[in-house]
């Protein structure tokens, strides 16, 4: 009798142990993803069977306090090839210290490439990150509650993850959009600000986006061309972004609800936002900028063009043979910031856009820095190492678009094991990856605390 009791107890213990392992596996096993977070804060990663987009359990990140938390996977990629990463995401009470750069998003670790972050409480929606691998042979693809320059708290669920490889567009014509934002109507520190573009503002912006396209061709000696579209947006901008360097400006998240449908329906390679943010009596605080660039709307270059307060006494944007023969200069300058950023990410060595004085270029009374921009775009700047400037490869480094995936190849990414042996092997492999990431001690991972996925 005692033997039967012992067998029953042993069998019960085995059953309970198996049930416990299955329960833990079902809730916490993240397949072949590595989990990581930057701060030692109360962050949880788990599989959720209640919040599901499809039949599979979703991946949940829960930050009880502000943190940058993510799960990621490194994949091999081909150089200079477009990749599309997409998933479904749902959020609950997501708050961010920097809403323009942090929230629920897809990102490439070690870079600023990420989708426009999502905050608040939202239902399932698809988000897509289009990236150019450039000179990289590996990409760390992450699903994130936080951002490259900020922290978030709340909950985010990710599901239905897919990665595709496309075919790069190597043409050199850039499709440019200039959005004329009729009105800014926002509240800052309890004060309401409302400004609108004037008829003259709009005519000058239209004239100079046309001149910008003509100058792209001539300054680059035909290495690139540009076509443009002007879209007037009557709905007001109701929020503005802020940083200590520039003060207030329009970020992609401030205009996404107003222009996103246009972006989806057209394959723009650069976006200009034409705005008025003040007058001579009262103005929204900005730190003395007229143009502001080096931003991205997803993977598309994004720039602000701010109309000067006093057009009557300003020659800016007005072509005048006596005073200003290069009124499109601000457009050219901000666009070049995007080309500069693209070429930097390909790890080329060349002068910074603001280095004109180091190479002997001074602002001219009537033409500004036109000669600098021309030599910059033609790679014709004299230096100790010979001619320097933008390598012409930058003109084919356009944003990745949906059309690049007309003949897409699905990449195996979200690997789900189907038996205990596969599960054990994957856990061991993830542990090795985690150790390898720690040993690299690079900017890509050095700020993160990695966690095994089992």
Image: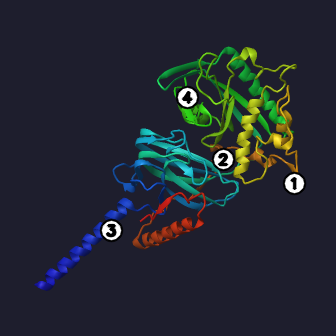
**In the image, which is nearer the foreground, mark 4 or mark 1?**
1
- Sequence-earlier tag: 2 or 1: 1
For the N terminus, the image quarter is: bottom left
* Residue 35 seen in the current view: yes
Q: Quick check: 118 above or below 9?
A: above
On screen, residue 325 versus residue 52, left or right, reads: right
**In the image, which is nearer the foreground, mark 1 or mark 3?**
1
Q: Quick check: 92 above or below 136?
A: above
Instruction: Measure the C-alpha gap from mark 2 to mark 1.
Output: 37 Å
User: SS for tag 2?
Assistant: helix
Closest to the observer, 341 or 247: 247
- Residue under the image location 53 percent in, 31 percent down: 257
Task: Please rate how many residues cluster around mark 2, counting C-alpha atoms within 10 Å: few if below 14, some from 14 to 19, many from 20.
Answer: some
Q: Quick check: 429 above or below 171?
A: below
Residue under label 3: 21
User: SS for tag 3?
Assistant: helix
- Sequence-earlier tag: 1 or 3: 3
Closest to the observer, 322 or 229: 322
Instruction: Measure the C-alpha gap from mark 2 to mark 4.
Output: 25 Å
- Sequence-earlier tag: 4 or 1: 4
Task: Please rate how many residues cluster around mark 3, counting C-alpha atoms within 10 Å: few if below 14, some from 14 to 19, many from 20.
Answer: few
Residue under label 1: 385
Closest to the observer, 317 or 395: 317
């Amino acid at each position: 009798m005692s033997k039967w009791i012992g067998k029953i107890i042993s069998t019960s213990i085995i059953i309970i142990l198996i049930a416990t392992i299955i329960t833990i596996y079902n809730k916490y096993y993240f397949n072949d993803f590595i989990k990581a977070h930057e701060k030692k804060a109360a962050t949880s990663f788990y599989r959720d069977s209640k919040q599901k987009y499809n039949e599979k359990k979703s991946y949940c990140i829960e930050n009880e306090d502000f943190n940058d938390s993510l799960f990621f996977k490194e994949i091999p990629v081909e150089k200079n090839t477009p990749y599309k990463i997409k998933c479904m995401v749902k959020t609950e009470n997501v708050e961010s210290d920097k809403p323009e750069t942090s929230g629920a998003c897809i990102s490439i670790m070690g870079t600023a490439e990420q989708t426009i972050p999502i905050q608040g409480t939202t239902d399932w929606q698809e988000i897509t990150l289009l990236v150019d691998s450039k000179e990289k042979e590996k990409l760390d693809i992450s699903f994130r509650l936080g951002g490259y320059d900020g922290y978030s708290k709340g909950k985010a669920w990710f599901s239905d993850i897919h990665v595709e490889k496309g075919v790069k567009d190597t043409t050199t014509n850039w499709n440019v959009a200039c959005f004329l934002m009729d009105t800014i109507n926002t509240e800052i520190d309890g004060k309401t600000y409302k400004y609108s573009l004037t008829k003259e503002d709009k005519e000058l912006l239209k004239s100079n986006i046309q001149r910008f396209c003509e100058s792209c061709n001539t300054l680059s000696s035909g290495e690139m061309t540009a076509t443009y579209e002007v879209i007037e947006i009557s709905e007001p901008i109701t929020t503005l972004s802020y940083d200590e360097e520039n003060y207030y400006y329009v970020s992609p998240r401030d205009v996404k609800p107003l222009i996103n449908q246009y972006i989806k329906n057209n394959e723009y390679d650069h976006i200009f936002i034409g705005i008025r943010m003040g007058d001579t009596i009262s103005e929204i605080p900005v730190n003395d900028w007229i143009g502001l660039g080096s931003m991205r709307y997803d993977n598309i270059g994004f720039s602000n063009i701010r109309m000067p307060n006093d057009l009557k006494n300003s020659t800016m944007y007005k072509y005048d043979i006596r005073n200003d023969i290069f009124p499109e200069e601000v457009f050219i300058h901000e666009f070049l910031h995007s080309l500069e950023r693209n070429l930097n990410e390909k790890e080329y060595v060349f002068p910074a856009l603001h280095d004109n004085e180091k190479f002997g270029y001074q602002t001219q009374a009537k033409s500004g820095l036109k000669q600098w921009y021309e030599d910059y775009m033609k790679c014709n700047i004299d230096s100790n190492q010979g001619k320097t400037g933008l390598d012409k490869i930058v003109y084919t480094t356009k944003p990745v678009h949906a059309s690049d995936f007309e003949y897409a190849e699905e990449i195996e990414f979200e690997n789900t094991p189907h038996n205990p042996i596969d599960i054990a092997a994957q856990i061991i492999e993830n542990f090795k990856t985690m150790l390898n990431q720690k040993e690299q001690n690079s900017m890509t991972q050095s700020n993160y605390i990695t966690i095994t996925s089992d």
